[in-house]
Each structure stands twice: as C-alpha cells, then as structure tokens.
Image: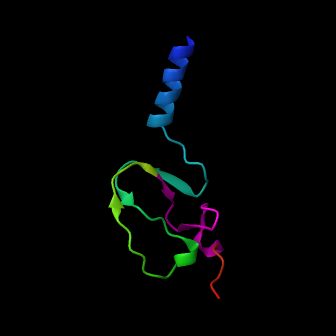
Amino acid sequence: MTDGEENLLNSMLIYHYPICVYEGEIYIEGCASACDPQCKYLGEKVFCILVCSPGCHCKPGYARDDNNVCIPQEDCPKKE
C-alpha cells in the first residue's frame, strides 16, 4: 500500500467510523440536542436547540463535568 492509499484509508476510517474519546460518550449520526446534560445544571431547565450533525454526546444517564467529560449523573458533585 502506498502512502497516499494509506492516508486515504485513514481519513475514511476517521470520517466514517468515528470514535468518541471518553467512555461515557456515544456517537450520534443524526439529530441530537446541542447541549449535553451538565453536572452544574442538573435539575434546572436549560434551553437547547436540536442540531442535525453527527457527533459525540453523553450516554443516557451521564452528564458533562467541569472538565467536559461525561460521567454518571450520580457521580456529579452535589450542589450546595
């Protein structure tokens, strides 16, 4: 395989078979909320829009912490 063929294959894998970085994330191909749940806003009403672009989002029952990592919602810091 030439370098050009290998680069093409690698780019196809990146764009057609995405991998989410964090364990608490899933890849959604279609429409999803523009706002993942966030620990600091759990229990509050948050206005979000629906976007139709693929990407990594928190799994159900997970929320983003202050480091933008999806963690189980029960592990979110308790509000004072």
Of 21 and 61, the residue lying toward us = 21
At x 60%, y 48%, the residue is 21
Is the image coloured rainbow, by chain, by secondary structure, or in one colour? rainbow
- Compared with 71, 54 (above or below) is above
Q: Is residue 61 magenta?
A: yes
Q: Position of residue 55 (x, y in %)?
A: 45, 50
Please state, as top left, top right, bottom left or bottom right, where the C terminus lies in the image.
bottom right
- Compared with 66, 3 (above or below) is above
The answer to whether any part of residue 55 appears in the image is yes
The answer to whether any part of residue 1 appears in the image is no
Of 72 and 70, the residue lying toward us = 70
Residue, far bottom: 80
At x 57%, y 76%, the residue is 40
- Compared with 48, 14 (above or below) is above
Residue, far top: 2
Classify residue 14 as left or right of residue 80: left
Q: Position of residue 11 (x, y in %)?
A: 49, 29
Quarter of the figure with residue 2: top right
